[in-house]
Image (cartoon, rainbow, N blue to C red):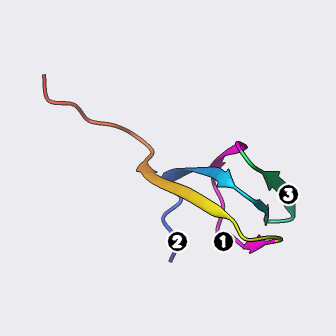
Amino acid sequence: MVDLSRKAYLFVIDGKIEVNGNTMKRQDVARIENEKSLLIESRIQSELLLIDLPEKYVFNQ
């Protein structure tokens, strides 16, 4: 089961990719929410950074 209470940020450091059918190139950023699956396809050699985060943040005060 996929946890939809999370979100992610995908950074294309270098290269060109497709994410769920959307083209991204060098220096593009995507915020990803409410996706059951993520299909990342490289069109050329690419460097990516994917940051996975909880939907809500809890900070101790």
What's the residue type where badge 3 is placed? Asn
Residue under the image location 80 percent in, 53 percent down? 24
Residue topped by disc 3: 22
Question: Is 31 part of what is drawn in magenta?
Answer: yes
- Look at the numbered disc 1 and give the secondary structure of its residue: loop
Q: Provide the residue span drawn in magenta.
A: 27-42
Relative depth, front residue between 17 and 56:
17
Horizontal arrangement in the rendering, residue 16 relative to residue 35 (left or right): right
Q: Could you give the CA–CA distance between mark 3 and mark 2, rounded to whole angstroms? A: 21 Å
- Look at the numbered disc 2 and give the secondary structure of its residue: loop
Few, some or many residues within 10 Å of mark 1 (<14, 14–19, 20+):
few
Residue under the image location 62 percent in, 62 percent down? 47
User: First in sequence: mark 2 or mark 1?
Assistant: 2
Residue topped by disc 1: 37
What's the residue type where badge 1 is placed? Ser
What's the residue type where badge 2 is placed? Val
36 relative to 51, above or below:
below
Give the quarter of the image for residue 48.
Answer: bottom right
Mark 2 vs mark 1, foreground winner is 1
User: First in sequence: mark 3 or mark 2?
Assistant: 2
- Look at the numbered disc 3 and give the secondary structure of its residue: strand
Q: Quadrant of the C terminus?
A: top left
Q: Residue furthest top?
A: 61
Residue topped by disc 2: 2
Q: Could you give the CA–CA distance between mark 1 and mark 3, rounded to whole angstroms? A: 14 Å
Residue under the image location 66 percent in, 52 percent down? 12
User: Marks 2 and 1: CB-CB under 8 Å?
Assistant: yes
Residue under the image location 64 percent in, 68 percent down? 36
User: First in sequence: mark 1 or mark 3?
Assistant: 3
Few, some or many residues within 10 Å of mark 3 (<14, 14–19, 20+):
few
Q: Position of residue 25 (x, y in %)?
A: 79, 51
